[in-house]
Image (cartoon, rainbow, N blue to C red):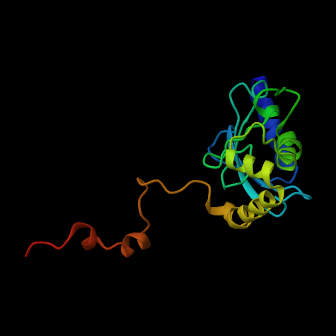
Amino acid sequence: MSSPSKRREMDLMKLMMSDYKVEMINDGMQEFYVEFNGPKDSPYHGGVWKIRVELPDAYPYKSPSIGFINKIYHPNVDEMSGSVCLDVINQTWSPMFDLVNVFEVFLPQLLLYPNPSDPLNGEAAALMMRDRTAYDQRVKEYCEKYAKPEDIGAKAEDKSSDEELSEDEYAASDDEEIAGKADP
């Protein structure tokens, strides 16, 4: 086993042992979801997010790719894609860091100390700079609407149109409406 894959395995096991709920996406250890709770003493407290983590082949020498699956209102998180703008992950990553650092230090720090001068969500940045109380209220609204524990269960990926219908869905669909009436 090569060093990066051994390290990837070790970091993933360490993350799982740290009481984080980890859900593998494929058979390999490169893509997975992690359940992440908003930090105390922040407007994100009480929110639960499903974070997609993708480890590059060169991990730990190259940083993981981190993204929020369910919506979050934050200046440094793209509202549509969930991409995270975080210097430690994107520019100053070091092999000394591991996955536990991402979830116990980097992401909580991001939520506790947003940086509106380097935004991915310009509206959130502008509101935060203009009216911090209104910004905190919007964060709480998003937490209530998109980040409750039950929201992370079914939000992983929307069904793609090429998936087959279940028997119940098929029985519920009315073919006549789609195709029209048959000729007599």
Image quadrant assignment for residue 30: top right
The residue shown at (72%, 24%) is 58
| Image position, residue 22 (x, y; %) | 75, 51
Number of marks drawn: 0
**Vertical relation: 5 (above or below) 66:** above
The residue shown at (83%, 49%) is 111
Q: Specify whether residue 39 is in view.
A: yes
Image quadrant assignment for residue 12: top right
Left or right: where 130 falls relative to 164: right
State the residue lying farthest toward the left: 184
| Image position, residue 107 (x, y; %) | 82, 45
142, 182: nearer the viewer = 142
Left or right: where 94 falls relative to 166: right
61, 113: nearer the viewer = 113
40, 184: nearer the viewer = 40
The residue shown at (69%, 41%) is 120
**Vertical relation: 94 (above or below) 142:** above
Image quadrant assignment for residue 90: top right
Q: Specify whether residue 34 is in view.
A: no
| Image position, residue 11 (x, y; %) | 82, 38
Left or right: where 172 falls relative to 107: left
State the residue lying farthest toward the front: 130
**Vertical relation: 99 (above or below) 164:** above
Image quadrant occupied by the N terminus: top right
Image quadrant occupied by the C terminus: bottom left
Left or right: where 173 falls relative to 103: left
